[in-house]
């Protein structure tokens, strides 16, 4: 093997287990240079005025990057941390460390792919290749029973065909050791203040998500060893709560799948499998349809009818002041914790779009700021479905929001999250 250094550009794949780009780089090069770039683009305001990344998700990201650095150091490596435009910094690092090639996982949303294209163009001027890998889905694109352009728009059809005709690949090995070049300055993990954010208030009513692969693997083990014990706060049904770690790539969908198999679960009928399939489906739909998911009209010719005073209604909704107790409780939990159960998400989205008649894209942008498990495809795909402008809006068997009476028959959830004393503490900390 020739004297070769490969730069591994980490993005939403913050793990050392089942990480193909990391393993492949260690096999193809003498040395690797792991890099994470805190891109200011993700910490600015969106077009609607909300932040692209709120403080709770940013803290989770910081913790995840710090944990990845620890894991790499335990293997003899290091994580170089920089802050700025990756299209400028990645080529600079490539030149500084005489890199032969750059590896990264391919994204599907237009902002993320746009950033990749900028980096690729900058590297191309240096005659360096940006090699793309596929590592965010349960089913590998090459193993699907149809090309991306022919993926069924119906989730039911997609689900049946992949379960019948595709197989989940085994997890790749974890590198035994990592060799890096002499790093002049590995950089520091930035604070929230350095990212332009403030420290979030930890609400005593909330489950505290800790970022990183270490916590992800602990949560995966906890989920299986405590079933069917309820592992969430009052007002929600038992859930894995793995979505924040899946969104950040601290754990892979394949790891979750093979853990299901290991524990002898009926995989195809398991709720976790359904969650993983929806994640795959929306990622592949984004690959197929791209920007349609960001349009208010979605896959229709016209956008839904809007209320005249939607600015006022939207402010009431996002602050949890609609006067509908269950809706307000869900929004209070979301704003305080960055997480709500999927049933809550469907209910509040349906209320915003169907009852209040507010532009659904505003709700999607609010979730983008607040959700600790935000990922573009799942977020925007789900909102489009609820708004009735998805690529198959007639198929709603999985998107049929339950009533508050079904979800909170004793009013325990509402009582927990519509608490004036706790809410005043949260407001004071904001």
Image (cartoon, rainbow, N blue to C red):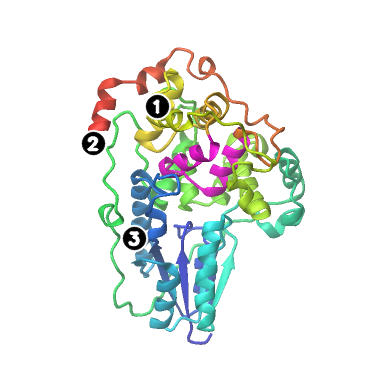
Residue 310 visible? The answer is yes
Q: Position of residue 175 (x, y in %)?
A: 48, 66
Q: Residue furthest top?
A: 410
Rendering quarter of residue 382:
top right
Q: Which residue is mark 2?
A: 429
The front one of 18 and 109 is: 109
Q: Residue at x 51, y 48 (%)?
A: 375
Going from N to C along the chain, the mark reached first, 3 or 1, is 3
Please tell me whether residue 45 is drawn above or below residue 311 in the rendered image. Answer: below
Name, please, the residue furthest toward the bottom.
2
The residue indicated by pointer 1 is 320
Stretch of the chain drawn in magenta: 359-386
Q: Earlier in the sequence, mark 2 or mark 3?
A: 3
Residue depicted at 34% across the width and 52% down the height: 63
Percent x, y of residue 360: 54, 36
* Contact, mark 3 vs mark 1 (Cβ under 8 Å): no
Question: Gap between marks 2 and 1, in whole Å?
Answer: 17 Å
* Labels 2, 3: front one: 2
Out of 341 and 229, give the one closest to the viewer: 341
State how far apart marks 3 and 1 are (Cα).
39 Å
Disc marking residue 244: none
* For residue 317, above or below residue 71: above
Are the two marked residues, 2 and 3, in contact with CB atoms closer than 8 angstroms? Answer: no
| In the depicted structure, whether residue 2 falls above or below residue 344 | below
Residue 148 is drawn in which quadrant?
bottom right
Q: Which residue is mark 3?
A: 70
- Using the numbered discs, state the Cα–Cα distance from disc 2 to disc 3 in whole angstroms: 31 Å
Q: Mostly what secondary structure, the magenta segment?
A: helix
For residue 128, say whether it is visible.
no
Residue 200 at x, y = what percent? 29, 41
Provide residue 53's location: percent of width, then percent of height. 40, 48
């Amino acid at each position: 093997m020739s004297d070769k250094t490969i730069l591994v550009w980490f993005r939403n794949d913050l793990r050392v287990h089942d990480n193909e780009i990391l393993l492949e780089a260690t096999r193809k090069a003498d040395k690797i240079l792991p890099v994470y770039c805190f891109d200011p683009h993700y910490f600015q305001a969106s077009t609607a005025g909300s932040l692209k990344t709120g403080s709770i998700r940013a803290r989770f990201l910081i913790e995840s990057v710090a944990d990845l650095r620890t894991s790499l150091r335990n293997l003899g490596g290091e994580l170089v941390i920089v802050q700025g435009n990756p299209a400028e910094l990645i080529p600079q690092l490539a030149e500084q460390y005489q890199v032969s090639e750059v590896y990264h996982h391919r994204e599907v949303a237009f902002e993320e792919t746009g950033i990749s294209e900028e980096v690729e163009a900058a590297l191309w001027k240096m005659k360096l290749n940006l090699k793309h890998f596929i590592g965010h889905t349960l089913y590998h694109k090459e193993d699907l029973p149809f090309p991306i352009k022919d993926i069924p728009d119906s989730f039911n059809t997609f689900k049946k065909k992949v379960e019948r005709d595709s197989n989940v690949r085994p997890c790749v090995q974890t590198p035994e050791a990592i060799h890096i070049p002499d790093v002049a300055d590995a950089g520091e993990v930035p604070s929230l203040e350095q990212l332009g954010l403030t420290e979030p208030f930890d609400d005593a009513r909330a489950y505290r998500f800790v970022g990183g692969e270490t916590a992800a693997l602990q949560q995966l083990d906890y989920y299986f060893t405590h079933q069917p014990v309820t592992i969430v706060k009052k007002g929600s049904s038992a859930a894995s709560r793995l979505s924040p770690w899946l969104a950040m790539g601290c754990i892979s969908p394949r790891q979750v799948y093979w853990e299901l198999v290991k524990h002898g679960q009926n995989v195809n009928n398991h709720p976790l499998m359904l969650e993983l399939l929806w994640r795959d489906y929306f990622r592949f739909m984004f690959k197929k349809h791209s920007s349609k998911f960001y349009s208010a009209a979605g896959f229709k010719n016209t956008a839904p009818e809007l209320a005249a005073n939607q600015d006022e209604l939207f402010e009431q909704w996002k602050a949890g002041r609609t006067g509908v107790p269950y809706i307000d409780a869900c929004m209070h939990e979301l704003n305080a914790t960055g997480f709500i159960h999927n049933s809550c998400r469907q209910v509040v989205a349906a209320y915003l779009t169907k009852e209040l008649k507010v532009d659904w894209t505003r709700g999607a942008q609010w979730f983008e700021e607040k959700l600790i498990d935000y990922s573009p495809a799942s977020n925007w795909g789900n909102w489009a479905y609820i708004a009735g402008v998805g690529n198959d809006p007639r198929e709603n068997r999985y998107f049929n929001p339950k009533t508050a009476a079904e979800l909170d028959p004793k009013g325990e959830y509402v009582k927990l999250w519509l608490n004036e004393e706790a809410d005043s503490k949260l407001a004071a900390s904001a």
